[in-house]
Image (cartoon, coloured by chain):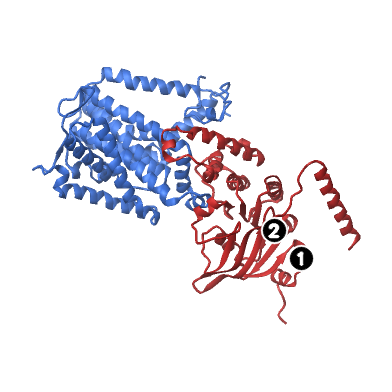
Chain colours: A blue, B red
Amino acid sequence: MLYREAGDFKTTYADDAQTFPIAFDRWRYYAILIVAAVIIPLVIDSYWAKSIMVPFLVFSIAAMGLNILTGYCGQVSLGTGGFMAVGAYASYKLMTAFPELNIFFVVLLSGGVTALVGAAFGLPSLRIKGFYLAVATLAAQFFLVWLFNKVPWFFNYSATGQITAPERTVFGIAVTGPSVPAYASYLFCLAFVVLLAWLMRNLTRGKVGRQWMAIRDMDIAAEIIGVHPLKTKLIAFAVSSFYVGVAGALFFSVYLGAAEPTEAFGIQQSFLVLFMIIIGGLGSIFGCFAGAAFMIMLPVLLKNVMAGALGWDTTLATHFEFIIVGGLIIVFLILEPHGLAQLARLMKEKLRLWPFPH
Amino acid sequence: MSIHAAEAAKDDASYAAQEEAHGIEPRRVGDVVMEMKNITLRFGGVTAIKDISFDVREHEIRAIIGPNGAGKSSMLNVINGFYHPQEGEIWFRGEKRGPMRPHEIAHQGIARTFQNIALFKGMSTLDNIMTGRMTLMKSNFWQHTFWKGGAEREEVEHRRRVEEIIDFLEIQAIRKTPVGRLPYGLQKRVELGRALAAEPKLLLLDEPMAGMNVEEKEDMCRFILDVNDEFGTTICLIEHDMGVVMDIADRVVVLDYGRKIGDGTPDEVRSNQDVIDAYLGVSHD
């Protein structure tokens, strides 16, 4: 009954183009923001921060990045893990080279560095398309991880080959390093998520987003209309890599604390993020969050239920977790190939008319 | 002159006088907008277009007709830069055109539709037509990133123009529907809208009426004539339906096997022996 647009008249084009056209959605959005920014930090403990909220937020950012490239611009990429590594190593080098630089700007600059690297690896996209482009970005994935393993300058010649995040503070509260309060790491990541989601909405609602989608849907027609194909694709690669780079920097500095490229940024991360956007929904901002929640939170939930509540053996629980998550992915792809976002859209469509059939 | 023709001429004259009396400017065909000079296009050993010249005048409806494989679509592809002819010159608005990419040609003011619809299937009607205004939007990437510096104002301004086109084409009801879900006839209309949105100096239509039933064809004819009348858009179109071409075109160029075999008003073309031979076949005895 609440979910109605009847009586909610739009009298300007700006109103008509707003993000949440239905009043109930707007209120729900503000409510979620308040819960996320005020209530969760008050109650969060280190288990929730470490194993659920921080990875969820970090991978939401990575999923947003890949969704810009794959969901909006139609360029498939398997290099997400490699670009996350670029963000991580850029943040490490910046943190050690400029200790006074605020960690907030370190993370943003790392995104900038990754954007440049991503644009360079996006150059072949003018000539190659689809699966072939995916293979080309796979090369980026392996090359970048190899590079960070082989060139000691990247890990400051440390004996183990690992990189370790030094302690950095925001407003006097540590957000990286060994002793970080749970709420600080959560809020730090949340700030980036909110900022980047807002930027993504801006980019995708107007001219830039339409250029990307035009290239995705019909590149020949896009060119006829005046879209510069290479420039548009490179911008998509750069913006996407910026997001992925920020995610990588946060993943390393806030979540892991110490990292080694093959394990932390291997091909499995690329696939994880790709699954997130496919399950969440290509070309949807909500889909990024839905997908990240599905892939990060569901396994934790299952593990807790099976090993904790039911008291199963941990190994058994882990195997069952794989089976259930894998099965659910297949079920989802068969029943709703457009992902959770489409499911939400259909539900809203039904809700708007409920209880009437038409 | 037959009595019939004389009467028709009188009607025309009185119609023009009426238009003038109402302050409506009668449509006048102006100077040459685009001139193709001795265009030859080869694909390896195959010559698709051989030494063809023709021109398009401002505000006119120019039709290109010919049997299958005559080189009509290749001609359009030459005009908007998909193919680069081996020989010949293209003059557009008084300037000789060098080799250009299709997106540069779009910025010069040439828009087109495709024979088999090339809409952006995942986007709504509104977004499709908004994309058509790409060349007219000035705001840059950073303004859009932060939705500041006039990005929003510009979107609204262009939305206003797009809504006019939506009204004109009578597709208000489907403005938020993804075009992939629309029936064929409407998709053709949306595609016309997308091309119109660019406010082109020259509009190329590749078989705008292909695969339509009679009513849809009539609608499309009306839209084409209205576009030409109200916006004064110069139109160059390919069409197979002879009745339609003869009714709406000002001048017709006829191609056959990559050569030009006729050029002139519909009446001239109709009585041209080469054209009759090409269309009806000729006995070789």
Q: Which of A341 and B251 lies nearest the eye of the viewer?
A: B251
* Quadrant of the image occupied by residue B282: bottom right
Instruction: From the viewer's side, name the closer residue of A158 and B244.
Output: A158
Q: Residue furthest right?
A: B3
Tell which subunit mark 2 falls on: B
Label 1: chain?
Answer: B
Image: A133 above or below A99: below
Residue sitting at x 57%, y 46%? B198
Q: Which residue is mark 2?
A: B241
- Residue A34: tell me if it is visible: yes
Q: What's the amino acid at mark 2?
A: Asp
| Residue located at (55% from left, 45% from top) | B132
For the image, the number of numbered tags is 2
Pinpoint residue B220: horizontal percent, then vertical percent.
68, 48
- Marks 2, 1: nearer the viewer: 1
Checking the image for residue B268, the label placed there is 1
Asked if residue B147 lies left or right of residue B277, the reply is left
Q: Earlier in the sequence, mark 2 or mark 1?
A: 2
